Amino acid sequence: MIMTHPGLPALWGMVVIGGMVILTLWAVITPLPASASAAVYNLTRVPLLRGLVRYLVSSPKILLALKLVFVVLFLLVIYAGLFGSQIPERNLATLLTWNIWWAGLIFSVFFLGTAWCAVCPWDTLAQWLVRRRLWKRAEPNNSLNLRVPRRLRTIWPALLMFIALTWLELGLGITTNPYATAAVSLLMVVMATSSLAIFERKAFCRYFCPVGRTVGFYSQLAPVELRPIDTQTCADCKTLDCYYGDRDTEPCPTWLVMGRLKQNSYCTSCGNCVSSCPNDNVAWRLRSPSVEAVQDARPRHDEAWFMIGLLALTGFHGLSMMPFWETWMSQLARVLHDSGQLLPSFTIGMFGSMAAVVLVYALFVAATRWLMGNGVPFRRLFTHLSFVALPLAFAYHMAHNLNHLVREGVGIGAVFLNPLGTGMAPLSMMEKHARHFHMIISQDSLFAIQAGLMVFGFWIAVQILRHRGRALLVAAGHRGGSWRLAPMLGFVVLMTCFHLWLLSQPMMMRM
Amino acid sequence: MKRFAQFVFAITLVALAASASAHHVLGRPAYSLNEDSNTPPSMQVETQIGNYFVTYMVFPAFPRAGEPGRINLYARNIDNGKPFTGNVTFTARDDTWFDTAKPEKLGVQVIDDNVFRQGFVFKHDGDYIIRAEFHDGGEPYLIDFPLRIGQPSPVGPLTLAGVALFAVLVGGSLFQRKRLQRDRIRAAHRDERSHSTREEGVS
């Protein structure tokens, strides 16, 4: 018997639709804005927080302690996966990795940007193995320091890795297999270590890591950023310690120059720039959560594909957990004469779903271009408008993951007491039912947050469309005429409605 | 008082009847459960092949060497929902890349209450492939599914990861050492050349 989580009630669905209608009307009536609010608040200016923030950022001991904690947990996951019980809901490896970390990671982005990358155990272990130092700069750095081949210096490898990870997660079902979870964890360490030992700086973090890039792109919507305090100080800087590092501090792992930094996408929050800046000119600051995606981030074609890929994959995550997905796969399997785990059918279904999202997006872009009078190349429109996919994917990703986190993360305390699940029987139906009634937050609160997230995603997407759309209209030689952006507004409405429909369906329990 | 006594008597009767009934419904106590019981934890997989929708369950969920286990297989026609009523042959073979041994027949089972039941006892821990085979409409139906006996070996992924890390780190170090040595030799040659040029200039 398969247990399902209840979907979002119709009442909350109506609230979301009401919010969408109001925001759409506002977007249609109000003239397009010239620029977004760029108000920022430097955390080092807060009297009480100043000292604490400076200490947290500049002290390597705090970061090292956090890294140690996460490395210990990561090694425990590997140990439990390989040596523990293979009952997924009783083993720390599956529960901590998929129900807590994988589901909760997105929420850390919402509040802390790319902070996860700073304590990532894959990179920490790779760093310790290759550099052979717990912290501080290692010279020589024991790496071959080869340049990453030009063809790989894009976001494509990370997108392919993310697709592969999704296939392993949903197709092969490693989320319910502690052994496979541990094996994949080990594989990620091997890949991070190999990359660090062969290529210069942290090519794995910058080009290959699916988690790092997902976190990086979503953090364009985070309310925090690491930026220079005074831009003139950076303009006058001759040493570029943030880029090259200093005697004790490693250089920026992802080739970023602080003076020119406009987006969080590739920052790993490692704090090297804070430690190495001779002028103490780098600090954390608060900002409007949408400003980067709205206007600061530079559009690039490969990044556009990554953002559309995120939208497609998050939707696919939801789709594959619907009870009717199995019926679809069963029907496809009959056509294909597929048998067994139906992996070929699943693979076709997965790529078909992804292709459908890309195709729909391309069609709406083409319609927008037609209304604009074909003054702007299709490729440019495809790239510039792809930012609208980011908040839609982010909002649905959080709303979907909230179900996993709140409803399936309940037994984590018991699993910490017995991480290997020794002597435990699988979760009985009665225990599964009991978990439904002992959620971390109440069901009504869960629904309210999910509805709020959907409206939030829609609102940011509309903002992005209005700002980026205005620049494109100007480039196409139109001074006004926001109606020409109507097809893209239609895309935002369509995708939000699709996500809302997915949320309102009962969702299959992962374990 | 009499009414109270009647009430107590009635309650006692109901309580006794309830416990007797409950005992009857529950059947055997938990400690006597074995592979033939429907209640021990099981692994259940649903799959589809040709015109049949097949469900198989393995009892217990994580069988061990030397302990009896059982496979239950249900096959129903996708179009009309009717169960398959012929014979099903179960075989087992090692799930290894280079296995040349012939599959071992576990048994041929007939339908019993819409279920094909096949018992097994494996002598050794390991990964096996169980094949359930039947014929319908002149077509052979082969359903392969993996069965793990005992805990999976932790050595595989650990060894692979260890070897890969060792190769990368040692290989990288050797290459780096050679490169440094080459750079040093080049630098020495350069120094030597510039030194001799200076000396020639002085003389």
Image (tube, grey):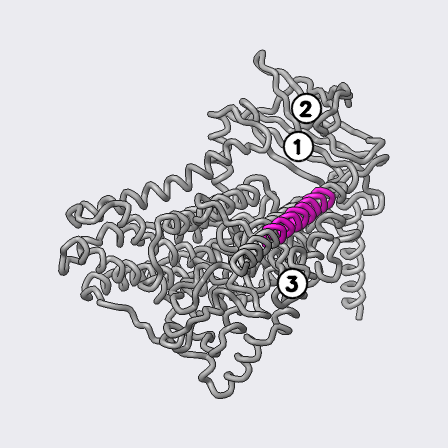
The residue tagged 3 is: A70
According to the picture, the residue beneath numbered tag 2 turns out to be: B132
**Which residue appears at 32% of the width and 63% of the height?**
A294
Instruction: Specify few, some or many for label 1: CA neighbours under 10 Å numbering under 14, 14-19, or 20 or more.
Output: many
Residue at position x 21%, y 47% in the image: A369
Q: Chain of mark 2?
A: B
| Mark 1 or mark 2: whose residue is earlier in sequence | 1
Q: Is residue A32 left or right of residue A349?
A: left
Q: Quadrant of the N terminus of chain A?
A: top right
Q: CA distance from mark 3 to mark 1?
A: 39 Å
Q: Is residue A402 left or right of residue A485?
A: right
| Residue A34 higher or lower than A162, as above or below | below
State the image coordinates of residue A9 (x, y, percent, origin top left): 43, 57
- Secondary structure, mark 3, is helix
**Residues at marks 3 and 1 touching, judged by CB atoms closer than 8 Å:** no
Find residue B164 and report its horizontal and vertical position in percent.
Answer: 68, 44
Query: Is residue B169 found inside the magenta-colored segment of the image?
Result: yes
Q: Are marks 3 and 2 on the same chain?
A: no
Magenta stretch: includes residue A58: no
Disc 3 packing (10 Å; few <14; some 14–19; many ≥20): some
Q: In percent of the image, x 18 and y 58: which residue is there? A: A474
Start-end of magenta stretch: B158-187
Q: CA distance from mark 1 to mark 2?
A: 10 Å
